[in-house]
Amino acid sequence: MNISIIGATGYSGVELIRLLLRHPEANITAVYSNSQAGSYLQDIYPHLSHTAVDTLQEIDTARIQQESDVVFIATPSGVSGKLVPQLMNDTLRIIDLSGDFRLETPELYKKWYAKDTAEQPYLEQAVYGLTEWMADAVQGARLIANPGCYPTASLLSLLPLTVNGLIDEKSIIIDAKSGVTGAGRSVSLGSQFCEVNESIAAYKVAKHQHTPEIEQTLGRLSGREVIISFTPHLVPMNRGILTTAYASLTPGTGHEAIHQAFHSAYEGKPFVRLRKPGSNPKTKEVYGSNYCDIAWHVDERTNRIIVLAVIDNVVKGAAGQAVQNMNVMAGLPETAGLDFTPVYP
């Protein structure tokens, strides 16, 4: 497959390059960045020296359509909503990592992102690419809305419980912690070393843009209205997300029903690793990989379940899941180009 990457200089874009360079069926034909067009990617990222990836090109939608089988868009939010209508045709497969096609209406997107996105007909063509739950729809899709990093860990944690009616869908609280790469590569005060080192802080409390994405997907797959409380935190590490989800169990829900729900949902799913109930997964245990590790605790005293999930936000939370979706779209093994163990320690 001939691959183009738009937004190749961000963390998700450069991680896509790392993964695709070792993919058995991928050939990176061009990398695009309007802001740094004409620059050598190796000058921006010296670790890519001696690879086939070369000069950054200015975005040319006609050329991308002509030369590519698949295009990944890893731009800031608000960009792909304008690009995708220019790119869509009968053959090109588009995987958007930016978030512009995750929400159901332009109005909902503008409320949470404070930007405009594509018109409604394009949003309706997008398939939400949470691969473990949407594989059938992904297989026939031309446009994939790759999930956000926080939603990936949160949804994989909660969907087995919500679709089986094991929790009160109005009681869900998600406490999430992310490494600094989640803030992107652009310079900002909040991500400078001296601001984040030796510190932890919540941000976008009660207004993070991933909130409606989580609610929408839980509601769509469970058939019930879902309202969550979601609070993200920034922690002083490069990669990784830990989500801790709390919910009240419905009357009569016991350990066996919970065990059955998780194991039925993820049997045969190569990138979800169910840990022993009562264990505590660490972000370091999935570092650099496409795995999501999940464990749960039942608090008998409060009749609540606590579900822990860890992912690498740049891999399973972005580039790795995008490649996983590409594999499903192309009829390849889901693990193609992704079959590596985490980096430890």
Image: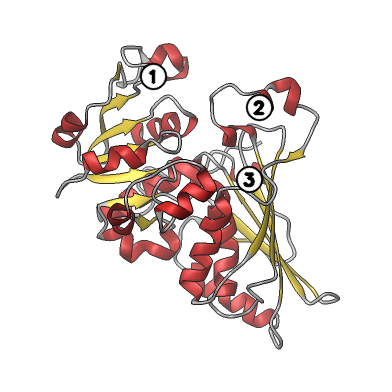
Q: Secondary structure at mark 2?
A: helix
Residue at point 21%, 45% (across, down): 88
Tell which of 235 and 271 is nearer to you: 235
The way the protein has been coloured in the rendering is secondary structure
* Residue 341, image x, y percentages: 52, 44
Residue 262 shows up from this direction: no
Q: Earlier in the sequence, mark 3 or mark 1?
A: 1
Tell which of 27 and 40 is nearer to you: 40
221 up-or-down from 23: above or below: below
The disc label shown at residue 241, or none: 3
* Residue 74, image x, y percentages: 40, 35
The disc label shown at residue 96, or none: none
Tell which of 121 and 300 is nearer to you: 121
Residue picked out by circle 2: 191
The disc label shown at residue 35, or none: 1
Residue at point 32%, 66% (across, down): 136
State the CA–CA distance, disc 2 to disc 3: 16 Å
State the CA–CA distance, disc 2 to disc 1: 21 Å
